[in-house]
Amino acid sequence: MMIVVMKRDATRAQVERVKEEARRFDLSPIEMPGDERMIVALKGDERKVTTGRFKSLQGVSDVLPILKKYKMASRDTKWKDTIVDLGDGIKIGGAQQVVMAGPCTIENEQQLRCSAKAVHKEGVRIVRGGAYKPRTSPYAFQGLGLKGLQMIRAVADELGMKVITELMDIRKIDEVCRYADIIQIGARNMQNYDLLTELGKCGKPVMIKRGLSATLEEFLLAAEYIVSEGNTNVILCERGIRTFETEVRFTLNLGVVPILKTLTHLPIIIDPSHAMGRREYVTDMALAALAVGAHGIIVEVHCKPEEALCDGPQSLTPEMFTNLMDRAEKISAAVDMPLIRVKKVKSRK
Ligand code: PEP
Ligand code: MN
């Protein structure tokens, strides 16, 4: 892999010329537009070609080999933070923090609407909820599937929200892409490489969760699978790793935030719910995640957690969520990454 840095004033024709030359050597060119100049990443076996070949083309400023194992996800390739734009002014990444919230699983319309409204009321505009669930036991509730996807889309549209929902199976990719605004790849699928490659081609933003015992390098290489297929709208999510500790579900590794921020330009989201496993611990760690500079959090909220079909013990009640949001706003301001919280609109009635 190498990158071709174009001159500031390079023309479209000159960029096309670089891409054409790349294809002649069986390299796939991927455009990575920056604010000031275009970068063209060349994917494939570059041993067959000398960098001089590209350096001599018009409009080319520099040609650099990328030595990191993950390349397009690396800050070496793209210095500026990636900001994933979901439309309607909702963005993830850069110098702001975002909250995604909702139930673990879509159970029925009433439950989903209640939880979605509760988080919407607090200014959240991205609702979570699984229709396809990776359950540890084959006897546990597996999710509502297509019916659930239709439900969450309808409720989100009613409220003017975006949807994040999990994709587990490559055969459902078109279905989930149709209903979701962000595709979630669960921790258990982080290394499902066929699935990741396909997602590169789907065009929808993807949030990939760190595997239960994946190293950061493995995590970034998983993201690389998606980015290197041309989908640069990738969000990383730390959700706790497996350690010797048994007091919590997983050990939430907030130390990855400053590390990932130096290694990659991709946004980093923290999931304190699946890590802590119990609601009384979730708020503190959610606030800590914002304090350490994550680009946001994803939190499970349920109107009646005691009746939840999945992950009830770790789901916040709407009251707890209100308290979290009020405190989150202060932390975000303190770390100079303002919280995206859509101002409460007063009802006309
Ligand atoms: C989830 O977000 O509901 C989930 C199953 O998370 P993870 O893949 O991190 O376990
Ligand atoms: Mn869950």
Image (cartoon, rainbow, N blue to C red):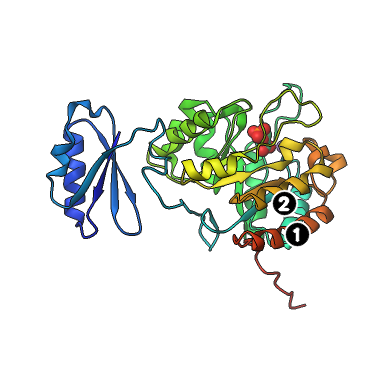
Above or below, comparing residue 320 to residue 241 in the picture: below
Above or below, comparing residue 207 to residue 225 in the picture: below
- Whole-angstrom CA distance, mark 2 to mark 1, is 8 Å
Closer to the camera, 185 or 220? 220
| Residue type beneath disc 2 | Leu
Q: Which residue is mark 2?
A: 287
Classify mark 1: residues with Cα within 10 Å, few (<14), some (14-19) or many (20+): some
Instruction: Give the quarter of the image for residue 29.
Output: top left
Classify mark 2: residues with Cα within 10 Å, few (<14), some (14-19) or many (20+): many
Judged left or right of residue 50, residue 314 is right
For label 1, the SS is: helix
Label 2 with label 1: CB-CB less than 8 Å:
yes
Residue farthest along the right direction in this orientation = 306
Give the mark nearest the N terminus, 2 or 1: 2
Q: Quadrant of the N terminus?
A: top left
Q: Which residue is mark 1?
A: 327
| Residue type beneath disc 1 | Arg
Residue 213 in picture, x, y percent from top left: 61, 25
Closer to the camera, 311 or 240? 240
| Image quarter for ligand 1 | top right
